[in-house]
Image (cartoon, rainbow, N blue to C red):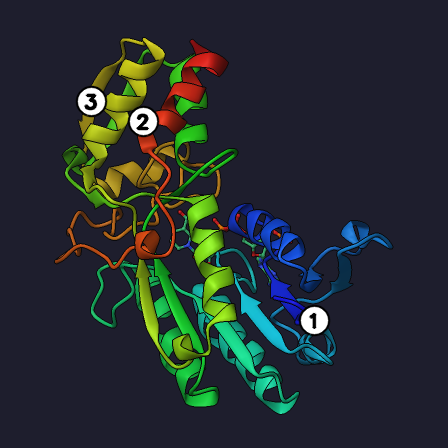
Amino acid sequence: MGTASVTVFGGSGFIGRHLVAQLVTSGARVRIAVRHSNRLSDHRPETVAADVLDDASVASAVDGASSVVNLVGILSQSGLHTYAAIHVKGARRVAVAARDAGVSRLIHVSALGATRTAPALSDRTKAEGEEVVRAAFPEATIIRPSLVFGRDDHFFTRLAEMARCSPILPLIGGGATKFQPAHVEDVAAAMVKVLERSDTAGRTYEFGGPEVYSFRELLERLLATVGWRRVLVSVPFPLGREFGGCPGAAARTSPDPRSSASAEDGQNQQRERADTCRSWRRPTDLRAFLRAFRAKYG
Ligand SMILES: NC(=O)c1ccc[n+]([C@@H]2O[C@H](COP(=O)([O-])OP(=O)(O)OC[C@H]3O[C@@H](n4cnc5c(N)ncnc54)[C@H](OP(=O)(O)O)[C@@H]3O)[C@@H](O)[C@H]2O)c1
């Protein structure tokens, strides 16, 4: 990345932390835009205060940057932090600020299930977010990841914590929802490549790993690898939301159901396999990652 200067919104999150590390390794000057001033740091990479709900802080965070990455997303709504505010207005605010600041490259991170007709509001607002970003910054590169796994992820780590203290695990919607999991390091590496290659401007990429699994298969693999026996109980999607600590509940405390499919409403939206980052990098194996869980929990 040489002398590029990259502002990363959402750089304190799961994917953001891995992306920032890889950008720094690639030689880029990275500025992480964080919401909370107690996370500001004088150390490299630079951190600045920015909330995507606020025009002035977003404009200031992109000032002087040659590239911007927007990873901001939420799983549940609270107060002013609605899906519309974050996924649509916030996404537009970042795109407009990037355009007005003369930024050359913008990566906007959406989700694989994002369509205007998706059953889940979060996915519909992600789709609307893509549209407003494209309108404000036509050369933006939009990335739609499937489920992203890795150390401290929102999915396996939380499922494992749940399995550790419960003999029963909920199979939301019968566990048929399909995922095409991609390792976070592969996703981050592909994003760095996107920034490096000018021919990715204006394009939309779907990021998924090499295999497609149902939610039940992922859960069974996790349990088998760690050596746990748990009773899997099928739970309808609307009821799943009440669990608070279960996949498909779309709650901040639950394993992250964001995937190629809407776990909330039980409609598999994965019509075809996502393009993967594997043409750019050999994908990290899910089995190898799960074996690390055996070391930690087994
Ligand atoms: N993880 C997955 O499996 C997956 C799958 C598909 C798509 N995605 C998408 O990928 C993106 C990153 O996902 P992730 O798993 O890394 O999410 P995450 O760990 O929840 O991180 C979200 C980031 O957004 C920031 N944020 C939230 N509200 C904000 C606001 N008002 N202003 C500024 N920053 C704000 C958070 O900052 P704080 O630290 O201040 O909370 C955090 O850094 C999201 O857009 C998500 O929808 C993720």
Task: Give the mark nearest the N terminus, 1 or 3.
Answer: 1
Where residue 132 appears, x then y in whole percent?
Answer: 42, 82
Q: Is residue 177 visible?
A: yes
Residue annotated with mark 3: 233
Q: Quadrant of residue 224?
A: top left
Three-letter amino acid code at the position of disc 2: Arg
Task: Give the mark nearest the N terminus, 3 or 2.
Answer: 3
Residue 250 is left or right of residue 219, and the answer is right
- Pair 1/2: label in front: 1
Q: Which mark is residue 3?
A: 1
Please rate how many residues cluster around mark 2, counting C-alpha atoms within 10 Å: few if below 14, some from 14 to 19, many from 20.
Answer: few
Identify whether 285 is placed above or below 46.
Answer: above
Q: Quadrant of residue 104?
A: bottom right
Identify the image quadrant of the N terminus.
Answer: bottom right
How far apart marks 3 and 2 lie (CA) works out to: 24 Å
Task: Give the mark nearest the N terminus, 1 or 2.
Answer: 1
Q: Is residue 76 visible?
A: no
The local secondary structure at tag 1 comes to: loop
